[in-house]
Image: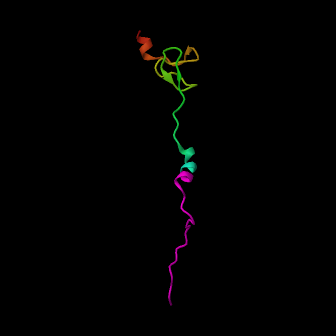
């Protein structure tokens, strides 16, 4: 008895051009996160976050900073 091992898998009919491949991948690009300047100390921070440097959010101190407590 003769057995045949035939593997069935997808075979493209035509080669995909560079332009079409790059157009398909156009949405995969990385983007830099948006940043704002802290109004209290001027450090660049992500929007709607407490500033890591001074501990302020929306003009008031939310996190007590050890550097500010020493001064």
Question: Looking at the image, is 69 positioned above or below residue 47?
Answer: above
Q: Magenta includes 16? A: yes
Q: Which residue lies furthest to the bottom in this view?
A: 1
Q: Which residue is drawn at 44% across and 12% down?
A: 69
Question: Looking at the image, is 57 positioned above or below residue 11?
Answer: above
| Colouring rule applied to residues | rainbow
Query: Could you tell me what secondary structure mostly forms the magenta stretch?
Result: loop
Q: Residue at x 53, y 36 (%)?
A: 31
Q: Nearer the viewer, residue 46 or 67?
A: 46
Q: Which of 63 and 8 is in front in this view?
A: 8
Task: Give the magenta-colored segment's residue range.
Answer: 1-21
Q: Which residue is drawn at 56% across and 65% down?
A: 12
Q: Where is residue 5 in the image (x, y as percent from the top left)?
A: 50, 79
Q: Position of residue 24 (x, y in %)?
A: 57, 50
Q: Position of residue 48 (x, y in %)?
A: 58, 25
Q: Quadrant of residue 11?
A: bottom right
């Amino acid at each position: 008895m003769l057995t045949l091992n035939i593997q069935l898998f997808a075979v493209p009919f035509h080669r995909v051009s560079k332009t079409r491949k790059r157009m398909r991948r156009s949405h995969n690009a990385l983007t830099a996160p948006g940043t704002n300047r802290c109004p209290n100390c001027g450090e660049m921070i992500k929007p709607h976050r407490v500033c890591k440097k001074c501990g302020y959010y929306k003009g008031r101190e939310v996190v007590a900073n050890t550097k500010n407590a020493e001064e």
